Amino acid sequence: MPIETRVNGKAVSINAEPDTPLLWVLREELQLTGTKFGCGIAACGACSVHIDGTVMRSCSVAVSEVAGKSITTIEGLGNEKAPHPLQTAWIAHQVPQCGYCQSGQLMAAAALLTTSPHPTDAQIDAAMTNICRCGTYTRIREAIHAVSEQGQTAGEAA
Amino acid sequence: MKIKRRHFLYGGAAVIGAGVFGVVGMDWHEASRAVALTTKAGEASFATWLKIAADGSITLFSPHIDFGQGSQTALAQMLADELDADWSHVSVEQAPADPAFANVALGKGFLKSTSSHPELIDMLPASLMGLLARGLNLQITGGSTAIRFTGQFSARVVGAAARQALLETAAGRLGVPIAELSAANSVISHAKSGKSLTYGALAEDAAARTLNLDVKLKERKDYKLIGKPIDRMDIPSKVDGRAQYGIDFHLPEMRVATVMAAPVRGGKLVSVDPAPAMAIKGVERVINLDDAVVVVATGYWAALKGVRALQPKFSDGGHGTLTSASIYDAQAALIKSGKPDNTGGSGDVGAALGAKDVKVLEADYRVPFLHQAMMEPFALTGHYKDGRLDVWGGTQDPLSAHAAIAKAADLNWDNVTFHTMIMGGGFGRRFPPYSQILEQIAKVAKQVDYPVKIIWSREEDVKQGAYRPQCAAHLKAALGADGKIKAWQTDYAQFTDAEAEALFIYNVPATARHHHKYISNQVDAYWRSVNNTQHGFWNESFIDELAAAAGQDPYQFRRAHLKPGSRHVAVLDEVAKRASWGTPLPKGMGRGIAIVESFGTIVAEVVEASLKPDGTPQVHKVYAVVDCGTTVNPKNGEAQVIGGINMGLSAALGEAITLTGGAVDQNSFTDYPILKMADAPAVDAHFIESDAPVGGLGEPGLPPVGPALANALFSITGKRVRSLPILTQAG
């Protein structure tokens, strides 16, 4: 039986083995490759997406668990024409290096700003546990603070 | 554009003597192919590496891959500055993995940096350099070479030569002397008549001219783009999921495979029953390779479940008793034997160490295997059809990757195409000689009649790595009654000689470098900043030990052993000043200092650290001062230095690959921990501009931070860190 869900605002019917991690459904069935595979055990955060507004590591969420839920990926956070304020700040602060972890970093940061629009450094440390091997943490922190100071936390596709 | 045979004969002849990119010594056939690969109607090619279209768009073909170090944007800045191009019309594309785009400048740079007579390299015929570069498949990204070699020797020269050709063409068309023309923003203007011509309008005729590569480059005061914090071109596509990495490549009918190789490197696949994998829905094939088993399925999840269901039998290649401890023991025994394989240095170390009025200090240092842990695991897609093999993905050397694939697939060079894609990190891991996935994709793709993508699991990535070598070193020095170092001897055991890295910057009358060649079952691989990590660690730790033994301040002690007025002293003084060295710190905090020169760049760093309640280190702030000659893009340069500091701290604090029974103990980021946001310090990165040759920036920020942290911890605890990582082995 197909699994009914919503991805970036669109109704989606998924035919996959129920134990398939959401990550691989997004990447291989829906061709939403902005969500990255890093470790498969929820240790790095490269695969972070929002499920009903909560940031989750999609490599460790079985697709059967998201039936009836609403999923937002990096492609749904914002795009070139209508970027999320964090995406604009990521460019302004020249955050990415290799860029591979940044989809996950942005999804984690967006979730943080939804719950804490003006996060302290300690809140950023606690929420931003995604790994960046290039070491872009300093600029991620700057970019989050910059958006927080602008008071911008745009809504996202539901 | 129309390809004229004559054009390339002229072009080739003109280039000889300048050694620009790969065009030298290129025959007409090869040059034609290069132009065909990169240009279409309405586009004019200059020396194959630059094209200008009739609409004014300007494209640089970069032989270097950009995996976040920003070199493609910086190379474009260098070329566009000399060209006086309109920056808004400049873009960069990856050069094809074709011998025509072998990087002559890189070969020249390497030869110069490894030669004791670098000036002789300039006298080598450029045609010979071109042949060398192509013979060696040089298209490497690594060694912090893009800017200091390719940028300086090629990008700027091509930009200036193309500008000259455009000026000559404009002079002819307008019938005025060149001296009356000026170039700016892709327009050539004649002030007297008020006439002007765009680069786009001039390009085709200009490209047919003989390029004069013996051109004068701009002086620093005339730079318009070099030295400016220009935004990197690749960043916008990396914030919204658009950027396509190798792992993202997709073809219709494509299957996905994953791999399990012999846990002990050097072992072979003895036998495997494919049935448990084949029983899993979605699994289509189990393919046996010499040292690995591969499961091919409809998707990654099924392939992973399949490979995990298998119970393959592997041999251990005779390495089944190897452990990290046995490696250190073997290395210590080599050092103790007193029979080095390679030696260097100057002066009479033995006499200085044996002198009566000196204090002799000795210390043993140990560093573990380190994993690059690039965020994108190995992933390549291959499609074998009608005798041809196409492969898509990332590598740090597309030409060598092409060669490795052709060899493994037993195909002629011309029947293989490597399509270079961007990479989620590399840090040395993606060099073809030890990228096992190249052989795997070649062999697997040839056995199936559909496109297949191999993705390594993170566990495979950690366990089958090509690590920074585990090394032991014994340092010995003589300290004179005057507080000066009289002799310094380093004995170190690793596979590579590490001649350049083992030599240090201090003035000591007698030095000796003893390399003891140690061979294990592991490959001797590159890791960001290569041998400078371990040699920087023990050199900069041991000099701190000597300072303490001499009762001197570590900054002043280093300073006293550096040449007065040198760049090294300037860098050291600046970092001490910025870090307020010598001023009181809050209770429980300490400072450590270190300075390492690598890849032509001098970096000094001061670490401010304290101990957390659980006794583990907390790094609060790092001050870094960098002299890389010219900083082509300061915004990006800062990012590279900060990134290097975070990676160096991560390694010094917690990273280690260990072996038991010849196999790697670690599995993933859970037991190979990478530094996270909460432990990333604030960084004050400062650049000193000098007239020194342009140095690298991708790596030099890393080596000083580990020893600076170890020295800071010593200042707090009085205990010396001689073994890494700190979190598991300190004390």
Image: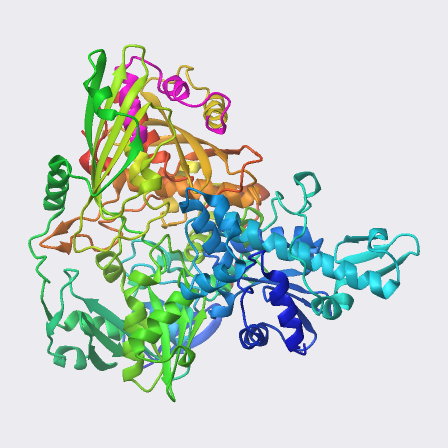
**Residue B591 in the image: above or below residue B132:** above
Q: Who's the residue at 19% across and 27% down the image? A: B363
Residue B511 in the image: state x and y as whole percent: 29, 28
Image quarter (top left, top right, bottom left or bottom right) of the C terminus of chain B:
top left
Q: Is residue B102 left or right of residue A2?
A: right
Q: Who's the residue at 39% across and 76% down the image? A: A29
Residue B650 visible in the current orientation: no
Q: How many marks are shown on the rendered structure?
A: 0
Q: How is the image coloured?
A: rainbow
Residue B408: quarter of image: bottom left
**Residue B597 in the image: above or below residue B479:** below
Residue B2 in the image: state x and y as whole percent: 68, 79
Residue B55: quarter of image: bottom right
Residue B89 visible in the current orientation: yes
Residue B659 in the image: state x and y as whole percent: 14, 51
**Residue B337 in the image: above or below residue B38:** above
Image quarter (top left, top right, bottom left or bottom right) of the N terminus of chain B:
bottom right
Residue B40 in the image: state x and y as whole percent: 64, 76
Of residues B74 and B347, the one nearer the viewer is: B347
Magenta: predominant secondary structure element? helix
Q: Is residue B629 left or right of residue B404?
A: right
B127 within the magenta span: no
Of residues B715 and B161, the one nearer the viewer is: B161
Residue A59: quarter of image: bottom left
Q: Residue furthest right?
A: B193
Q: Residue furthest bottom?
A: B386
B555 within the magenta span: yes
Q: Which residues are magenta?
A: B539-568
**Residue B28 in the image: above or below residue B701:** below
Q: Who's the residue at 70% across and 67% down the image? A: B207
